[in-house]
């Protein structure tokens, strides 16, 4: 394959990754926004009534989260195709971490759709007394939160490696790559913090801001500009 063909292929991967960065973030944000509107803290029956009253909208929210998990695989493939020339082994490791992330999120989606029947199934809510129902749905909520944070830890490992490779390359501005790397390193601190000290969750979630900003900025940059494959950082031979 000629050098120009390689350049075109790598730029195609880069622009695809840029689009998927934006699309995945959009899908997750829409899903979280919709589903969070239905939750009433400490009131299982009110939550159930809200879901029953707008079941289709709630299902759209859950489906949006599932689409985000699915498209994470395409995002990871795009980033791998963009960055494997810098270091094939690290890019492959990052790809694996992101695929595991998507798998865990998919399992969480299965759990959420399954427990939806607790709310909308005929007579299901009446099959339990208030304390039993509260206990069951509290376990469901806890499992969903744990699943999200475990998936996010795998996300952070892949994101750290991808942004490290961006920092080694000239594909993104170095400041943007550094912010992405820093934000990725904050994520496991946030997630382990929530798992260990759940009471601090409302403060720890602010740790997501740097990586959120970095992903959107990186997505826009890659989508619009692609990559310049003639930078000095890429001239070094890739690891085998």
Image (cartoon, rainbow, N blue to C red):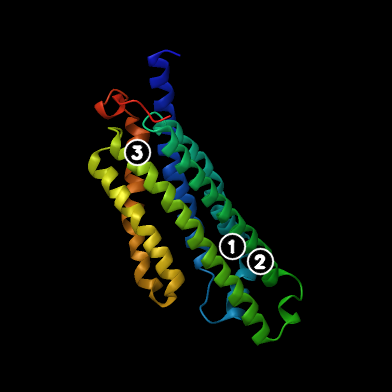
**Badge 1 local density, few (<14 within 10 Å), some, or many (20+)?**
many
Q: Where is residue 192 in the image (x, y as percent from the top left)?
A: 42, 66
Q: Where is residue 77 in the image (x, y as percent from the top left)?
A: 49, 36
**Badge 3 local density, few (<14 within 10 Å), some, or many (20+)?**
many
Q: In this view, does 65 lie to the left or right of 185?
A: right
Q: Which residue is drawn at 67% across and 83% down?
A: 132
Q: Residue at x 57, y 68 (%)?
A: 143
Name the front one of labels 2 and 3: 3
**Mark-to-mark CA distance, 3 and 1:** 38 Å
Q: Position of residue 85 (x, y in %)?
A: 39, 28
Picture mark count: 3
Q: Where is residue 181 in the image (x, y as percent from the top left)?
A: 32, 48
Asked if residue 139 is positioned above or below residue 239 in the image, the reply reads below
Tell me the quarter of the image containing the N terminus.
Answer: top left
Please tell me whether mark 2 sits on a helix, a strand or a loop. Answer: helix
Q: Of label 1 and label 2, which has the lower sequence position?
A: 1
Q: Is residue 239 left or right of residue 133?
A: left
Q: Residue at x 31, y 33 (%)?
A: 171
Q: Which mark is residue 58?
A: 1
What residue sits right under mark 3 in the picture?
165
Tell me the quarter of the image containing the C terminus.
Answer: top left
- Quick check: marks 1 and 2 in contact, CB under 8 Å? yes
């Amino acid at each position: 394959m000629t050098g120009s063909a390689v350049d075109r292929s790598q730029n195609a991967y880069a622009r695809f990754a840029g689009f998927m960065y934006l699309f995945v973030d959009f899908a997750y944000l829409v899903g979280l926004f919709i589903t969070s509107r239905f939750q009433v803290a400490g009131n299982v029956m009110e939550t159930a009534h809200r879901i029953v009253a707008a079941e289709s909208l709630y299902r759209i929210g859950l489906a949006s989260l599932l689409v985000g998990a699915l498209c994470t695989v395409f995002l990871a493939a795009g980033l791998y195709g963009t960055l494997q020339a810098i270091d094939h082994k690290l890019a492959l490791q990052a790809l694996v971490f992101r695929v595991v992330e998507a798998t865990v999120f998919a399992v969480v989606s299965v759990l959420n759709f399954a427990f939806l029947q607790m709310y909308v199934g005929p007579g299901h809510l009446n099959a339990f007394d208030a304390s039993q129902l509260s206990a069951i749905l509290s376990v469901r909520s806890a499992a969903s939160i744990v699943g999200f944070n475990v998936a996010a830890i795998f996300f952070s490992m892949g994101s750290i490696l991808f942004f490290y490779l961006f920092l080694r390359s000239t594909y993104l501005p170095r400041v943007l790559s550094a912010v992405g790397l820093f934000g990725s390193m904050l994520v496991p601190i946030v997630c382990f913090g929530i798992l260990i000290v759940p009471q601090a969750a409302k403060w720890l979630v602010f740790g997501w801001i740097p990586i959120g900003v970095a992903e959107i900025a990186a997505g826009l940059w890659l989508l619009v500009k692609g990559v310049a494959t003639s930078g000095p950082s890429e001239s070094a031979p890739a690891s085998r």
